[in-house]
Amino acid sequence: MKRTKQVAGWAVVAVAACGRASAPAPQEAGSPPVVAATSGAEAGGAAPGSTAVAAAPRPGTRVELGGTTEQGRFKVSVVFDTPRVGQLFAVEATVLPTAATADIASVDVDATMPAHRHGMMTRPVSERSGPNRWKIDGMKLHMHGAWVFHVGVHADGKLDEIQLPFDQPPEAVGP
């Protein structure tokens, strides 16, 4: 997967995590807050290159990152609970074709820190968990700071990708 492309034009919307969203999504009682990131075009028409940054989610906060792949063939969503620095965690990915049905062979997720020019020290393992769904085990963000999740969708003999920025917070301090 490509790891050198710059990430721009993303808006980050926090829902019930820091109270900065204009219309929080409904949640079940007792469910963790959700932080969602979408491309600028999907975040209500934010201008390309603009960024609305919410506070970094605390460990345990449910996060959903998503958007449309570079070639526009798939809508991708990855969901996970914000890990502590150095903690192994799993990602659940949902991949939906945007047009004609594609035969999705596999979905890979990896993460890099562009500013530090390195990736994770683990090799995640991806396994289909249902129709259009994959579970990726073995993710580990060993430093706090700006990471980029790289999602690769292998379908019909082609690779389509999306890059999703995520700010890994430092260790949490009390509530």
Image (cartoon, rainbow, N blue to C red):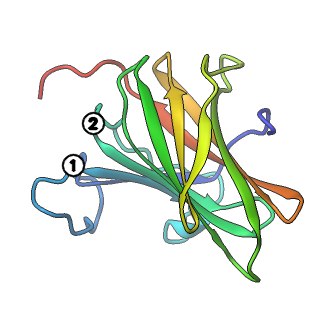
Mark 1 surroundings: few (<14), some (14-19) or many (≥20) residues within 10 A: some
Q: In the rendered view, would you say 45 is above or below 117?
A: below
- Rendering coords of residue 83 (x, y %): 37, 30
Q: Can the viewer see residue 74?
A: yes
- Rendering coords of residue 144 (x, y %): 45, 20
Mark earlier in primary sequence (1, 2)? 1
Image mark for residue 60: 2
Q: Amino acid at mark 2?
A: Gly
Q: Quadrant of the C terminus?
A: top left
Check contact, mark 1 vs mark 2: CB within 8 A. Answer: yes
Disc 2 element = loop
Q: Is residue 20 left or right of residue 159?
A: left
- Rendering coords of residue 35 (x, y %): 36, 50
- Give the Cα separation between the discs numbered 1 and 2: 7 Å
Q: Quadrant of the N terminus?
A: top right
Q: Amino acid at mark 1?
A: Pro
The residue under the point 79% across, 33% down is 4
Q: Can the viewer see residue 47?
A: no
Q: Is residue 158 left or right of residue 94?
A: right
Disc 1 element = loop
Q: Which residue is mark 1?
A: 32
**Looking at this rendering, what residue extends furthest in the right direction?**
157
Q: Is residue 18 left or right of residue 57?
A: left
